[in-house]
Amino acid sequence: MRMNQTMAEALGEALRRPLTRGEALALLEGVRTWEDALSSFE
Amino acid sequence: MGGRPQLFRVAATVRDQEVGRTVRLMGFITSITPCTTDPPCRYCWRWASPRAFSDSDVLNEKQLARAARAIEDLGIKRVELGGGTLRGEEGGELTLRAAAAVTGACKMGVWINNGPSFGIQHVHELKQVGVEGIACNLESIRERVYEMARPGDSLARRKEIVEESDRAGLLIDNTLMIGLGEAWEDKHPYREWVDFLFWLKQFPGLKILEIHPFRPVPRSPMEELPAGSPFETAKVRAVARLVFRNIGIAGADEPLGVMAGANMVMHAVAVTKKERSRPGVACGPARVRDIGDGLVLADSLPALRRYVEDLGLVLEE
């Protein structure tokens, strides 16, 4: 749940500004299936 | 999006906002230098085809000019000159002569992609002859991967050339190879991939990023290692779009690449000597025609036009 929230926040911010190193890593580690890449993290 | 962000959709949205929905194209001419790396990289095409990157592959200056004009006639705006790593003073001299032959024959932006065939002193000379950018591809940023997969090469030397290219005011293209050096039992090295992206982020001249999966080459010492994952490749392309925003990201010749925010296709049109294998695009095939003087041109524009239109994007013309 916590990871999903972090990724959702990072992606929301990514519409406005570049990802930080920590956000980039969290997304690569957190997106584990193709559904993750296409669906929300709520 | 209704407050429900999704990695690929966000990456594609940022692509559309920052650089639009036009797919940018790179032409390709190879080879400008033979490869003398010893031992050869353990995943190189030299294992499958001894002719690849040999002396017989190399175009002379007249052929290079002819190749450049043929590519430019098709409306291509930039071209990369590919080759193997030729060490020593000869590598630098041959690269400079090739670059000058092409910049003198066309108005396209000219990029150099032949590894560390030249030293940092040549970087400034390449700029002087009109080169626009340099692709000295790292493929991995881990020394351990170089020791295992590229024992005849040097990560430090490649990094120096990238650093000097930026100092010289040249643009930068670089490649990350997803899965290079991974064994079957390994977990994906996410931290390494992020380190790669953020090492490149220091260079304002970074304009093109290529993120490709490792493809095991038949008869190479690494032929039985796992191929790089197309899905992990797409994830890294999407994250790269969200890190770099407005650069060219290659991989737009694959639907997954487009969904992940790619906007560029390398090798859209390629010229080689007749007998050589030719790079192409994922949505191929290319139309191959003889352009004289022992050269052939592989034109992937017809395939790209159909494919890009099907996806609702626009091809750079």
Image (cartoon, rainbow, N blue to C red):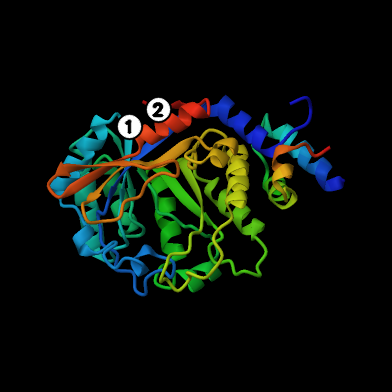
The image quarter containing residue B104 is top left
Q: In which quarter of the image is the N terminus of chain B?
A: top right
Residue at 55% across, 36% down: B258
Q: Observer-nearest residue: B295 or B155?
A: B295
Residue B37, above or below B204: below
Residue B81: percent from the left, percent from the top?
29, 48
Q: Which of marks 1 and 2 is in front?
A: 2
Q: Which amino acid does label 2 sit on?
A: Glu
- Image quarter where the C terminus of chain B lies is top left
Q: Which mark is residue B316?
A: 2
Q: Contact (CB < 8 A) between labels 1 and 2?
A: yes
In this rendered view, identify the residue nearer to me: B151 or B181: B181
Q: What residue type is labelled 1?
A: Lys
Residue B285, position as x, y percentages in the image: 37, 42
Q: Distance between the residues labelled 1 and 2?
A: 9 Å
What residue is shown at x 33% (from left), y 69% (from top)? B37
Name the residue that disc number 1 marks: B77
Q: Can residue B127 be seen in this view?
A: yes
Q: Report if residue B170 is visible in the image.
A: no
The residue marked by circle 1 belongs to what chain? B
Q: What element carries label 1?
A: loop
| Badge 2: chain ID | B
Q: In this view, does B49 lie to the left or right of B105?
A: right
Q: Residues within 10 Å of mark 1 (few under 14, many from 20)?
A: some
The quarter holding residue B182 reads bottom right
Q: Which mark is residue B298?
A: none
The answer to which of A42 and B193 lies nearer the viewer is A42
The answer to whether B187 is drawn above or below residue B110 in the figure is below
Residue depicted at x 80% and y 43%: A6
Indicate the secondary structure of the residue bearing disc 2. loop
